[in-house]
């Protein structure tokens, strides 16, 4: 996935920086030659002492001569999976993943004593999409090597670090079995903005809206407004929102969706609570304030006008559901019934803002993305760093045939439809054995506050 640099001039960020700056009692930093590791690492330590959520348990400065990314990692609290540092001129410092490089991701299973990687999703306008990959296709070989129980993890890591993928794929349906064996070569490239997809499913006199959201981008409020106005015009009475592959993004975008979904809220209703270190303190934001942080073109009132006739929402989730997506789940709970279906979410309950090293004029330096605030809903519920357990636990990979997202036969959507309609039909027993990936490459995005 692409990264977008954003300059935040909002009042909230101004006040945040003001609070932190006025609370900084550290002694002046030593002077080092510009551009050296010492110059960068001294700055990193000062910023982390000021902003970092767990600043009181940070290590001492230590050796300032090591590579800055390694130095930054040494400052982090044990178990902090969220904070990171990148340099815009050093691509290798950015996260490595299939989604970011190629626009798709996979899961692994065994079926009839053979091993496969199943394609979970393919982003629109991505290298994977442009090369014909689709959800449900099975990968049998990577760089000519067949998958097996002993090498699938190693081959996955090789895929995430590659700049070109050479894979063998095959299709499968219960009716026709295996077919359409292909060799596919994909070059690393850009993935562009994603659409918000929706459909209306009619079942037992019910009109059920299904919406798939792959990311919370800046400026997405307009898309949400259009999508849900159309769903409202179609008179839906139930809603399923698919966030299972949504790694998060912008809080204002998440607030826009929440404003549409939640019944009976006011502009001043409390949406989110931030709790930082002693410098940052506590900050509360209403729905309207959270929206205004980065969505100034769409009003609270316009979004409320697109609220469909619902008082509960079904959210499809899984281990790729993180950050702003988990915020949706947790922060809507005080205002409506939220029924989660799928697997446990990633567990990213922190937020912050980027900190750029702009001390050298005309030269881009390191950018820090530290955890600055813990986030809570209006009832002060949060602390889901180990993930949010779904109310209805279902593994979406149960058969070798994996249906497209939005297809009523797809496992999680089918479970949601059955829950809505009261269908108690017995589900099929799993015929595949899934295998976890040892190294977590979940594409979680920095939860940006304004």
Image (tube, rainbow, N blue to C red):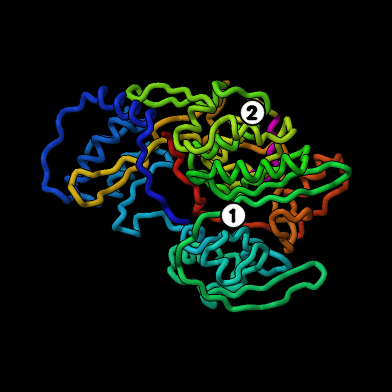
What kind of secondary structure does the magenta stretch mostly adopt? strand
- State which quadrant residue 47 falls in: top left
> For the point 34% across and 59% down, which residue is it?
91
At horizontal 60% and vertical 65% (from top left) the residue drawn is: 149
Count all numbered tags in the image, as a single digit: 2
Residue 436 in view (yes/no): yes
Q: Residue at x 78, y 55 (%)?
A: 409
Please check the rendered image and state whether residue 342 is part of the magenta-colored stretch, yes or no: yes
Q: Left or right? Give the position of 418 relative to 74.
A: right
- Residue, x 51% and y 67% (percent of image)? 127
| Horizontal side, residue 396 vs residue 322: left or right | right
Q: Which residue is mark 1?
A: 436
Of the 4 image quadrants, the one containing the C terminus is top left
Separation of residues labelled 2 and 1 (CA atoms): 30 Å
Residue designated by label 2: 333
Magenta-drawn segment: 337-343
Per the image, label 1 sits on a secondary structure element best described as: loop
């Amino acid at each position: 996935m692409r990264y977008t640099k954003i300059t935040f001039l909002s009042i909230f960020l101004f006040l945040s920086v003001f609070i932190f700056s006025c609370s900084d009692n550290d002694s002046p930093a030593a002077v080092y030659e510009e551009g050296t590791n010492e110059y960068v690492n001294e700055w990193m330590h000062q910023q982390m002492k000021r902003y970092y959520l767990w600043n009181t348990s940070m290590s001492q400065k230590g050796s300032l001569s090591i590579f800055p990314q390694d130095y930054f990692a040494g400052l982090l609290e044990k178990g902090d999976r969220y904070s990171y540092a990148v340099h815009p001129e050093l691509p290798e410092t950015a996260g490595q993943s299939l989604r970011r490089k190629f626009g798709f991701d996979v899961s692994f299973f065994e079926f009839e004593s053979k091993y496969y990687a199943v394609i979970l999703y393919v982003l629109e306008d991505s290298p994977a999409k442009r090369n014909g990959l689709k959800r449900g296709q099975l990968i049998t070989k990577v760089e000519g090597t067949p998958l097996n129980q002993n090498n699938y993890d190693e081959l996955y890591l090789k895929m995430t670090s590659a700049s070109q993928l050479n894979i063998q794929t095959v299709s499968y349906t219960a009716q026709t079995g295996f077919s359409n064996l292909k060799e596919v070569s994909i070059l690393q490239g850009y993935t562009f903005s994603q659409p918000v997809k929706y459909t209306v499913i009619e079942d037992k006199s019910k009109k059920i809206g299904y919406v798939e959201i792959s990311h919370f981008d800046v400026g997405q409020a307009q898309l949400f407004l259009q999508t849900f106005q159309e769903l409202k015009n179609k008179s839906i009475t139930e809603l399923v929102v698919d966030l299972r592959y949504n790694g998060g993004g912008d809080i204002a975008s998440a607030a826009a969706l929440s404003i549409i979904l939640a019944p009976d809220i006011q502009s001043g209703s409390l949406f989110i609570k931030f709790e930082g270190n002693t410098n940052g303190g506590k900050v509360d934001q209403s729905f309207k304030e959270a929206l205004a942080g980065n969505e100034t073109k769409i009003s609270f009132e316009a979004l409320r006008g697109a609220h469909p006739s619902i008082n509960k929402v079904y959210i499809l989730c899984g281990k790729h559901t993180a950050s702003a997506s988990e915020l949706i789940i947790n922060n809507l709970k005080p205002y409506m019934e939220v029924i989660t279906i799928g697997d446990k979410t990633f567990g990213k309950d922190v937020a912050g803002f980027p900190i750029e090293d702009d001390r050298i004029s005309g030269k881009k330096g390191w950018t820090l993305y530290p955890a600055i605030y813990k986030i809570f809903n209006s009832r002060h519920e949060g602390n889901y760093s180990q993930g949010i357990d779904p109310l209805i636990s279902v593994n979406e990979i149960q058969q070798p045939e994996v249906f497209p997202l939005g297809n009523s036969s797809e496992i999680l959507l089918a479970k949601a439809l059955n829950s809505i309609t009261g269908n108690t039909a017995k589900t099929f027993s799993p015929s595949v054995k899934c295998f976890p990936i040892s190294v977590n490459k979940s594409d979680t995005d920095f939860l940006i506050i304004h």
